[in-house]
Image: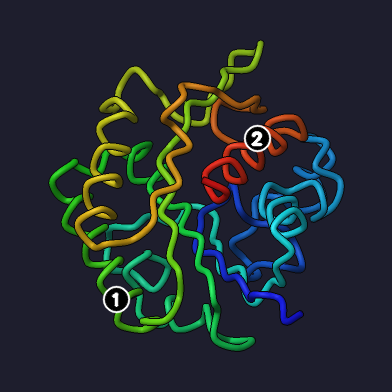
Amino acid sequence: MIRKKVSILGDSVSTYEGFTPDGFVFYGEWNARETGVASAKDTWWRKVIGVMGWKLARNNSMSGSLVAGRLLTSGTSIRRIKDLAANGMPDVILVAMGANDWGFSVLPEEFESEYRNMLQLLKLTYPDARIWCATLPEAEEPDQEYSFFNVDAVVSKRVYSDIIRKAAAEADLEIADLAAGGQSYQTIDGVHPNREGMQTLANLWISALKK
């Protein structure tokens, strides 16, 4: 049986050294050790690929990247979107973007416009791929003072998840509604999952993909 090829368009949560673009990796040697995400097998996306019986085509996830901004690192970058086919045309694309737009306070109306633009580019570039758009699940704050974002200073994450749901539905794409059940995942800084958090994210993805 021919396995489906999957590509991933994501941010730092979906990175891992040796698998994602150099220079934009959160889960490098030091952070991998600190989070307990000791190998790529501990990431949410490798767990999903294993359960679904897929084959990784390309993981073009970049730490710090936003959907908005019209940069080479943005989700709307045509170069970045085309790179999803660097190892062959994907049958499935998993989009895990938007957390940095939320965290860096991109206005909801700008995020909506840019997210729609990203989805349009994905559909035009990969008309035969099944594209899944993930909402933004809540993250648990660790028992320490350091937080990656000042969550009290930004708009509710739920606003951005609502935009993702609406944009994906209107584009006739699949929604991986990770935020729907209200389940949070463990982190080291309020954003980046530790080993247990990666498993939670994987479970949420698998549940959505199997519906």
Q: Is residue 139 left or right of residue 169?
A: right
Q: CA distance from mark 2 to mark 1?
A: 29 Å
Amino acid type indicated by mark 2 = Pro
81 in relation to 196, above or below? below
User: Which secondary structure lies at badge 1?
Assistant: helix
Q: Quarter of the image holding residue 8?
A: bottom right
Position of residue 109 measured from the top left corner of the image (x, y, whole percent):
13, 46
Amino acid type indicated by mark 1 = Leu
Which residue: 32% across, 69% down? 76
Q: Is residue 119 left or right of residue 198?
A: left
Sequence-first tag of 2 and 1: 1
Where is mark 1, residue-wise? 121
Q: Nearer the viewer, residue 147 or 92?
A: 92
Mark 2 is surrounded, within 10 Å at the Cα level, by few (under 14), some (14 to 19) or many (20 or more) other residues, namely many
Mark 1 is surrounded, within 10 Å at the Cα level, by few (under 14), some (14 to 19) or many (20 or more) other residues, namely some
Q: State which mark lies toward you, 2 or 1.
A: 1
Position of residue 211 measured from the top left corner of the image (x, y, whole percent):
51, 45
Q: Which mark is residue 54?
A: none
The N terminus, quarter of image: bottom right
Q: Nearer the viewer, residue 162 or 9?
A: 162
Which residue: 65% across, 50% down? 26
Position of residue 185 measured from the top left corner of the image (x, y, whole percent):
60, 26
